[in-house]
Image: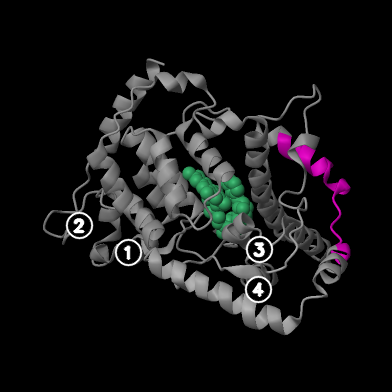
Amino acid sequence: MKNSNIEIVDLWDHLLINPAEISTGSNTPYTVYGPFFKKFKGQLDKVNFDNEEDKDFKFEKLKDLDDELIESKLVTKSKTIFDEFLKNINFSGIGICPCRPGEIGAEKLLESFSSSNKITSYHLARDFPSEDGTSYLSGSLRFGTISIRSLWKKTLLLNLINEDTKKIQSIETWQKELAWREFYQHCLFHYPELEKGPYRKKWNNFSWNDNQEWFNRWSEGQTGVPIIDASMRQLNQSGWMHNRCRMIVASFLVKDLICNWKLGEKKFMELLVDGDLAANNGGWQWSASSGMDPKPLRIFNPYTQTKKFDPLCKYIKFWIPELSGINNSEIINGDISKLEKINYPSPIVSHNVQQRIFKTLYATI
Ligand SMILES: Cc1cc2nc3c(=O)[nH]c(=O)nc-3n(C[C@H](O)[C@H](O)[C@H](O)COP(=O)(O)OP(=O)(O)OC[C@H]3O[C@@H](n4cnc5c(N)ncnc54)[C@H](O)[C@@H]3O)c2cc1C
């Protein structure tokens, strides 16, 4: 920013607690989320949630810059660059991507999430991809257009004014998700080798299938398994995917298609507007069972997941219009008749068969 005569100041504000300052009783980094969360919560009283100092700071540093100059030159310039960027990467999802660019966009998202009943019913709605149940602040946190302190401060204020225990519980559920973000950053800070491969080294000996044709079908949303295809189409078209769906497609790629999770991790980073090394790597290692998560082997059945989390197939039918006329029970059971499928493929694999193969391979490591 030398040419624009703008001073850049480096400040600690990406996380609530510096990963170097949080450790177990034996002075080692945390590797399990539960105990991490307990310690993390106990250390929050060290955090300064009062933003007044920051406002003064901004004012001091920016007072020499004329407001009009910022409005007319910088904003217009960055908007032009942004529009140009969207055109060049051929991204058409700006209208259907729920994340919003910029500081004002982030504040609006927070306002809409926290002033409605969304935050107080988060614990009920967050797992249903057809519902408007989460904050969509991941992109803003990723790019630092909103501070994690302002989000946490909001939860503290809401907890003070809410008396209903269910509502307080819901706000705490959201806090726990914000803490997952801190946890994965903590893990990557202390174990930078996570970026390169599995935390559990035995996975280096696993015989991946890595079938390119299957991987392409997964990437394009053409596997013939509706919940997988709906999710991957959402990602391709909008640059974002619901958390429940991220877990389902990750499990499917690793445990049904037997493809190395590193391929999926890379694909996600290419496409996600909130792509973040720590959260993405943590999410993939969790799904692949190669990470710090103590549960050894977790396999999601895509049909059972559909029945639980998209029982009316609203999400599926939105992203796969070819299936809009199909009976929900056929979609949920995975037995759509050939005659009814118009331009929609048959499943590339059988979940039950692949699960058996995967478990046999897993037994060898
Ligand atoms: C395979 C996989 C890959 C993922 N890749 C990313 C990624 O690249 N970037 C990213 O920000 N999140 C990632 N996540 C986590 C999660 O899916 C998204 O943070 C969430 O869907 C964003 O939506 P939201 O902002 O509406 O979240 P909300 O439910 O409103 O949660 C609030 C915030 O908490 C944080 N958060 C929520 N869940 C998680 C989680 N499981 N892990 C870490 N942080 C979390 C996010 O910053 C999120 O914005 C991934 C999860 C999986 C399973």
**Residue designated by label 2:** 344
Asked if the stretch drawn in magenta spans residue 39, the answer is: yes
Say whether disc 4 or disc 1 marks the residue closer to the N-terminus. Answer: 4
Q: Specify start and end residues of the magenta stretch as a single range.
A: 36-53
Which disc, if any, is residue 317?
1
Residue 91, visible in the rendered structure: no
Say whether disc 3 or disc 1 marks the residue closer to the N-terminus. Answer: 3
Which of labels 1 and 2 is toward the front? 2
Which of labels 2 and 3 is toward the front? 3
**Residue designated by label 4:** 104
Q: Is residue 297 left or right of residue 171?
A: left
Question: Within 10 Å of the Cα at label 3, are there few (<14), some (14-19), or many (20+) other Cα atoms?
Answer: some
**Up/down of 289 relative to 323, above or below:** above
Residue 275: horizontal and vertical position, in percent? 52, 51
**Element type where label 1 sits in the image:** helix
Q: CA distance from mark 2 to mark 4?
A: 41 Å
- Quarter of the image with the N terminus is bottom right
Say whether disc 2 or disc 3 marks the residue closer to the N-terminus. Answer: 3
Ligand 1 within 8 Å, label 2 CB: no
Q: CA distance from mark 3 to mark 4?
A: 8 Å
Residue 137: horizontal and vertical position, in percent? 60, 61
Q: CA distance from mark 2 to mark 3?
A: 40 Å
The reply to whether callout 2 and callout 3 are in contact (CB within 8 Å) is no
At x 72%, y 48%, the residue is 15
Q: CA distance from mark 3 to mark 1?
A: 33 Å
At x 76%, y 81%, the residue is 66
Which of labels 3 and 1 is toward the front? 3
**Element type where label 2 sits in the image:** loop
